[in-house]
Amino acid sequence: MDFTLTEERQMLQDTLRRYLADRYTTSVRNGILAGDTGFSPDIWRELAELGLVGALFSETDGGFGGAGFDIATVFEELGRAGVVEPFLDTAILGGRLLAALGNPEQKPLLERVIAGDLHLALAHGEPASRYDLSRVETTARAEAGDIVLNGRKAVVVNAEAAGFLIVSARESGGFFDLDGISLFLVPADSAGLSLRGYPMLAGGRAAEVTLDEVRLPVSARLGEAGKGFGPLMDALGAAHVALAAETLGAMETAVELTRQYLLTRHQFGRPIGTFQALQHRFADMLIELEQARSAVINAAGHLETADRDRQNAAARNLISRAGRLVAEETIQMHGGIAMTQEYELAHIAKRIVMAEHRFGDADYHLERFIALGAA
Amino acid sequence: MDLNYTDEEKAFREEVRAFLAEKLPKEVSDKVRAGISLGKEGHERWHATLNEKGWLNYNWPREFGGAEWNAVQRHIFEEECAMAHAPRIVPFGLSMLGPVLQKFGSKTQQDFFLPRILNGAHWWCQGYSEPGAGSDLASLKTRAVRDGDHYVVNGQKTWTTLGQYANWIFCLVRTDPAAKQQEGISFLLIDMDTPGIEVRPIVLLDGTPEVNEVFFDDVRVPVENLVGEENKGWTYAKYLLTHERTNIAGVGFSQAGLDAVKRIARVECANGRPLAENPHFAARLARVEIDLMAMATTNMRIISRAAAGQAPGVESSMLKVKGTIIRQEINDLARRAVGPYAMPFASEAVEGDNDPIGPDYAGPVAAQYFNNRKLSIFGGSNEIQRGIIAKVRMGG
C-alpha cells in the first residue's frame, strides 16, 4: 500500500493550491457570486492553462491524467478554495461522456474543452426524477430521418454557459427502465431549446431546460440508441469521486478557519478554544475529517474497479454525514460571524451542504450501498 | 497511491492464515468467538504455540530475539488473528513491559526478565490505576520508601486485568511526594509472591472476574527491581503507552464482529422477513460498515506512515476514539439483533452440559455489549483522547 501522491500529482496539487490561494481570494469570489454569469471566464481560462482540465482526461483523450486520484487531487483543491467554476459539469460530466461516446465528428470538441474554450452541461435530471437515474420522461422520437426531443430537464448546472447540452431522452421502454435511454449532443442554440436560468444558493448558475420539438440530425446521438444508461453511470462514477473530494477540501477549510477562530476569539477573558465543550467537538470534527479523507481515497482508488459503485455510495454517504457535521459545527463554534454572507466560512459551509444535493444525499447513498451489498 | 498490498505482504498474509488454520484449535477459536474465558492455561498454551513459531514477540527488535515485524506486518497478523478468533496475546509482558525493559532496563533486568516473558514463567500484570487515579493517573498515591536495599511499598492498585493469573506486577509508585506530580513517580517490578500483597477480584457488570484490586502492605521490593532511574517512572510509563498502539483501532475485531452481526441478521426474523432486510436495522448496519471501511483505510494510512518510520502521534488518539465507537456500535447491533434471547444470563452454572438457552449465537452478545463499554474508558478515556487531539491540533 502506498498513500503518497505521485510526483506529478504533488506538483498539480501545489500549483493549484498556490494559484487559488493567490487568485481566488474571498473578495474575488464574493465578486463572482455577486455577478450574473455565475463564474469568472478569466479564472476559468487561467485554470485551464494551468492544466486543470487536462488533468481530468486520459492521454488518449488529449489530457494527461483522468484517473481517480487525478480527479480527487484537482477537486480537493477546488473545494478547499470554495471554487464555484463549473469544472464538474464541463469536464467530468460533459467531458467524460464526450470522450467515451463521441463519434469522429463530436470528439474533436474535447480539445476545446481541455483548452478551456468550450463549456458543456449534462441535462439529465427532471422535475420528477429526484435522484432516480433511470427515470427519464423526456422523449426522443424518430421523424423523417431526424430525432425530435420533447421534455423538461431540472436544475441543469452550467446550462447557460454551455455550447452543447448532453441531453438524456427515452427512445423506448417505460419511465424507470435502464434500457431505452439515449444521449444527445444538443447545440445550445437549437430551435425549441429554452432555458430559465437562475443563481444557486452556494454559487454558480443552473437552469430549468425545456425541449419543445427540438429537431436534431441522427448524428447528434452520443453512443448507441437506448444504451445511454451505462455510460452515464460511468461519468457519474467519476462525478461522485469529484464531489466527495471537493467536499473534503471544503471541510478542511471550514475546520482550519474554525481552528484559527478558536485561538483568536476571546470571551470570558480567554480564547474560546480553551473551553472543553468546544475542544471535544473540534476533536470529533478532526476525526471525521480523517474518515472523509479515507473515504475519498477508497472511492478514487476503486474508480476503475468492479467495486466502484459500492465504494462511491459508501464515500458519499460518509461524506454527506461528516460534511453536515463539519458545516453545522463550524458555524456553531464561530457563532454570529459565520451567519454573515461575506465571511469565508459561510460560503464554504454552503458548498459542503449543497454538494449533498448533487446525485444523491446521505439517505440515497445509504440505500444504494445496502442494495449493492445485497446483490 | 496504491490501495493494494505488495506481493510480499500478500504472501505473508497467506503464511499467517496457513499457520492459524493448522495451529489454532477449533475449541479455542469457538471459545473466543463466544466470549468464553480461556483460563490461564488456555492463554499459556496459545502463547507457547506462537513462541514455538517465533511469532510471540513479533514486536520486539531482533537484538532481543524478536521478529521485528514492521507496522504493516503487525497489522496483517493482528487482523488475521482477529478474523480467525484467535486468542489475543496477553499484552502486559510482551508489548508493555518488554519494550520498556529493552529501552530503559539494565542488562541484568533484560537478561532475567525478557526470556521469562517469552517462556511463560512470568505472567505480568499492570499496576497503574488507583481508586483515586484514573484518567488523572499522575495523581497516584501508592508510596515506595527506600529502606536500605529495599523499597517498602504501601497502597492500592485497581482495574488490574487478569491479575489473578499474574506472578509479577509492574507498578507506578510515588517515591518523592514533595516533587511535582509527574516528577516523583518511579517504575518498580514486584514479585506477587512477596509477603504483604493481596489480590481481590472485582466482578464486572457482565459477570466476569476480569479485573482485580491489588493491595500493598509494607511490601519489600529489592532496589534492583527499579527500572531506570528513581523518579523518572512517568517517562517510562508514557513510553509504554505510546509504544503499543498499532492495534488500537481494532479493525480486525470490528470486521469479525460485523460478520457475526450479518450472520445473525440473516437468521433472525422480524415480521416474517430476515432482520437483514428490515430497513431500520439494515441502515444502521450499513452506516457502521461504511464507517469501518473508511476506518480501515485511516488505519492503513497511519500504519504505512509508521512502517516508513514516522511515529504515530495524535493519530493514535483518533483511531482509539473512532475505533471504539465503531466496535461499540457493532456490539449494540448484535445485542439488538438477537431480540429477547439477549436477556438470559448465560453461564456455566445455568447451562452446564445442557443445550444453550435460545440460539447459540445469542448467549454472549449482551455480556459482550456491556463488557465492551470498557473500550471507551480504558487506555485513556475517549474524553482524554479528545482533549489530546484538540490540544495538539489546535496549536497556537
Image (cartoon, grey):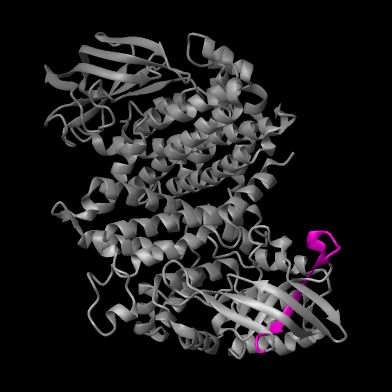
Foreground residue, B184 or A168?
A: B184
Image check: B159 left or right of A273? Answer: left
Q: Position of residue A323 (x, y in %)?
A: 48, 36
x 30%, y 31%: residue: A103
Task: List the single residue furthest toward the right.
Answer: B148
Asked if the stretch drawn in magenta spans residue B191, the answer is yes
Work out whether A210 lies above or below B263. Answer: above
Q: Position of residue A153 (x, y in %)?
A: 27, 19
Residue A49 appearing in the image: yes
Q: Position of residue A82 (x, y in %)?
A: 55, 26
Asked if the stretch drawn in magenta spans residue B326, the answer is no
Work out whether B128 lies above or below B291. Answer: below
x 31%, y 14%: residue: A208
Residue B59 appearing in the image: no
Work out whether B343 lies above or below A23. Answer: below
Which span is picked out in magenta? B177-193
Foreground residue, A46 or A178?
A: A178
Q: Position of residue B325 (x, y in %)?
A: 47, 53
Image check: B32 left or right of A13? Answer: left
- Within the image, what quadrant is residue A164 found in? top left
x 79%, y 75%: residue: B144
x 26%, y 85%: residue: B353
Task: List the single residue furthest toward the front.
Answer: B217
